[in-house]
Image: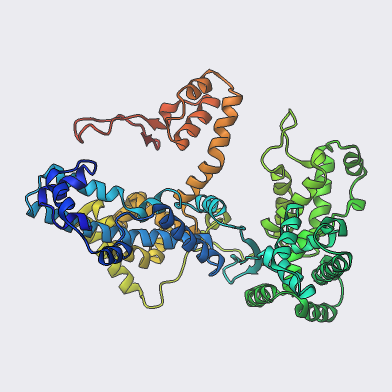
Amino acid sequence: MSRKHKTGTEENLVESVVNPGVSHESEQDQSDMQIDPPSDAGDEQAIYPEIADESQFFKNVALFYLKLQAKCLLPSSVIQTIIEDFQEIHDISQSHLLFKLKERLITLGISEADTNNVIEVMKNEDLFRTCNTQPLKTNQKRKTVFKNSFNYVEPAQICLGQNEAGKECFAQMMANLSEEIKEIICKTLPNLSEETQLQIILKLQSSGLESKEDLEYVQQEDIADLLPVIQRRKLLDAFKLVTLDLQAIPTSSSLSSDLSASESSLSSCTHSSSSQLSAIASCSNRARNSEPSNRPSTFQILKTWPETFQVPWEQMPQEIRSAIADGKRPKPVARRQMVRVLADEMRRYEANPTRAQCLTVVQNIIRQYPKSFADMTPDGSLLGGGYTSLLIQVKNRIENLNRDVSFTRHRSSTQKRGPTDTYGCTRFQPEFPAEETDDTVEQHRQRLVEIYRQEGAGGAERAEVKNLMELTFSLQRRHINTLPTPDIEDVKSKWPFLFTPRYIYAHFELLTDINVLRSLELSMEECGRAITRYFRENPTNKDVNDVISYGEDNEVALRVVQLLMAHFGEDLNGLIILADFQVQQGKSQLEVGGSPLRAV
């Protein structure tokens, strides 16, 4: 409560919250007669501001999330979990607060309508919830806020190898280019003023400087209006020394050299590299302890070989060389031969390159010869990034080559899982938690069945259920993975909460490390509007025109589904049923078939 409420009646207090624009004569008279001491009023105003600065609060929350990423180097998935958990705790606190407020208002004799109005106003004024559920809800939205509100540079992910489970590990390098350039300038020209240093940095960045490697392209005329001739020469020499140090990192050409020579070059490189690179290299060594011995032994090679990879064009078929020289597309047969040569050359550096490494190599080829290899529409427009089809060909070729060097296969009469069953799963059949046994986990399962029997699907909101579902995940997988495959009814009788939306999504996330709802939302954000724009500019039939004519009142996901089904001539009623959910349960029945449907 603020100072203006101290002398008001209960009726005026409620009225001031429900109708903040209405004033009262009695309150006005008392405020005219009341004289507050200036010092006390000033102190109280400073300590208890009546109106919070919403924009400042929003920036502070955004800055906190940015620090988690930039200083603590937390991945976006961890930050998303922190946000959701904080919001859940905050919601519990707010629910308790609003419940107590409602009790108090009812005790004071306030009508239920006014009480509910006050509660609704309080909910809408929750700044923290507004930030987390709207502008800062997803990783993509946070990136947009960071770029618009701060001097933000998105971190670069660097692959460190794979852990024991075969999952790739990454580090995020947050390099502040301005600070690095400023450090070079200060070491070279220590007497240069702060203003001149800033002008040089801004001039270089406006000229297109994106990394320290670009410093080798700086010329004297680029900064001629900022420094005398001798100082320009000193600074350019310092820039060249920095780029030489960066080039000293071993590249793909050094892979064929002796191992001892590689190690000695690594030690000389380490002394001249930055502290960030050294820290990440040490993390890389730990990550590679569990990798096969045929992987490159230095972090620099692991990091740079796809970027410095040289395509052996001289080994390519003559038709490929003629096509890239003339800017034409080669025939499919010649392209497949090129993919074979390319895959063989890449496997000289790493037996099984990751998709990210293949992507880097393929993107470089597309940038160099887009007319010959990029994915294009008949009118010459680029499809997506232009690299999808070539990337699929290269990755499939590498996987086919590695199929012959897999582990020895042992014949078995028992039924086994196929490779597609575990594809994409990070925890297909995990072990029990360290503190759990078969008996304790089974007791947890029985407790879940008991809760469901007593409370039904509504028990899914209980914290106890959430904890027990996480503890019993390994037993859930054991029951689901049983061969022969169990019936749905059998699984449902043992795990009733697994058939509620909350826990089927949670189970999928534990199984694959993918939040399916968030992934769908991000995909719709990235692709939904592009699909809508494409069909608006190029309607393919009358049904598509009808969907476009509805406008953009519908949500993006529904509009995209409608457009795609209209384009392919599918019946919308076979997938989506439009129903009035205002009708009370039991008064309306929907006739549905045996296929899955979405009710809207």
Taking the view exactly as shown, the residue that stands out farthest to the top is 542
Of 127 and 537, which appears nearest the observer? 127
Residue 14 placement (x, y as % from top left): 15, 48
Total marks placed = 0
User: Which color scheme is applied?
Assistant: rainbow
Residue 72 placement (x, y as % from top left): 53, 70
| Residue 428 at least partly seen | no
Q: Residue placed at 25% from the left, 66% from the top?
A: 40
Give the side of residue 313 with respect to residue 569, left or right. Answer: right
The image shows residue 326, relative to residue 240, as above or below, that is above
Give the side of residue 369 with respect to residue 420, left or right. Answer: right
Residue 327 placement (x, y as % from top left): 87, 37
Q: Quadrant of the C terminus?
A: top left
Q: Residue placed at 55% from the left, 69% from the top?
A: 71
Give the side of residue 243 with respect to residue 286, left or right. Answer: right
| Residue 518 at least partly seen | yes
Residue 405 placement (x, y as % from top left): 72, 64
The image shows residue 256, relative to residue 587, as above or below, that is below
Q: Residue placed at 14% from the left, 52% from the top?
A: 30
The image shows residue 315, relative to residue 581, as above or below, that is below
Of 42 and 172, which appears nearest the observer? 42
Q: Quadrant of the N terminus?
A: bottom left
Of 439 and 571, which appears nearest the observer? 571
Q: Residue placed at 52% from the left, 20% from the top?
A: 545
Q: Residue 402 falls in which quadrant of the image? A: bottom right
